[in-house]
Amino acid sequence: MAKTTILIVDDEAAIRDVVGITLDLAGFDTIKASNAHDAHVSILDQKPDLVLLDWMLPGGSGIELARRLRRDEITSNIPIIMLTAKASEDNKVQGLNEGVDDYVTKPFSPRELVARIKTVLRRVNGKERDKSLQVFDLKLDPTSHRVTIEDELVEMGPTEFRLLKFFMQNQEKVFSRDHIQTSVWGANVYLEERTIDVHIRRLRKALSSVDGASINYSKLIQTVRSAGYRFSVRPA
């Protein structure tokens, strides 16, 4: 399976390095930012799975960034853990009221930090598993296992359903065929590249099967030359 990516936002290089090493050893991928502006750019460009966010940052506080992320539909569901020296009860209450998922104070235990991260990710991923997904009038309901376009049922096989769910949960990211294989079929399944392509074609065919739809949803699954595929509402 693909590794979980965590953005570490702290103005102290030593903290970024210590946390980075801790998370690398725990099996996570990490990216880093030293201020609120760079953090916001990284979140929009790289779409991390979780943000570790310091309160005191140059160019705007961490709590202001958390507030901004929660207001934006694109970033509103990204899990946020405050990792800060601000340890008062009032600070913790303010952070939680702004929508952060957890609050860890410095100095921190590396083992506790990793455990807190895993707990938040389990909680968020559990919610995401059963959450209905929607892009324009394309809807996927994991509970009923139905896909509709403009309220018309779209017939597709179970593999195409899993593919579509994966793409809709990971919009605007480019995935190689190997990455798609491990995420949809599992790491221990061997598939030829053309097998992935066949299922992509079937999914596109299913998404274009609704006559008179206002959007050709098959075009949202874009081929990226020499890289793989992405699901995007932007022009290819």
Image (spheres, rainbow, N blue to C red):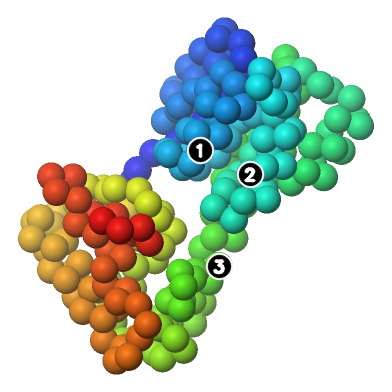
- Point out residue 18 in the picture as x, y percentages from the top left corner: 54, 13
Q: Are marks 3 and 2 in contact (CB under 8 Å)?
A: no
Residue 178 visible to the viewer: no
The answer to whether residue 26 is above or below residue 47 is above
Q: Which mark is residue 43?
A: 1
Reading the image, the residue beneath label 2 is 69
Question: Which residue is depicted at the point 30% across and 58% down?
Answer: 235
Q: Residue furthest top?
A: 14
Image quadrant where residue 229 sits: bottom left
**Mark 2: which amino acid?**
Leu
Image coordinates of residue 230 in percent, x first then y, are 29, 55
SS assignment at label 3: loop
Callout 1 touching callout 2 (CB < 8 Å)? yes
Query: Would you name the residue on which mark 3 appears?
Result: 131
- Mark 2 residue element: helix
User: Is 176 situated above or below 37?
Assistant: below
Q: Quarter of the image for the C terminus: give it.
A: bottom left
Q: Is label 3 or label 1 in front?
A: 1
Q: Residue at x 26, y 86 (%)?
A: 209
Label whose residue precedes the other's in the sequence (3 or 1): 1
- CA distance separating discs 3 and 2: 20 Å
Residue 112 is left or right of residue 48, and the answer is right
Residue type, label 3? Lys
Q: Tell me what residue is drawn at x 62 percent, y 51 percent.
A: 72
Amino acid type of disc 1?
A: Ile
In percent of width and height, residue 16 lies at 55, 16
Quick one: label 3, few (<14), some, or many (20+) residues within 10 Å? some
The crowding category of the residue bearing disc 2, from other C-alpha atoms within 10 Å (few below 14, some 14 to 19, many at least 20), is: many
Residue 58 visible in the snapshot: yes
Towards the viewer: 95 or 196 = 95
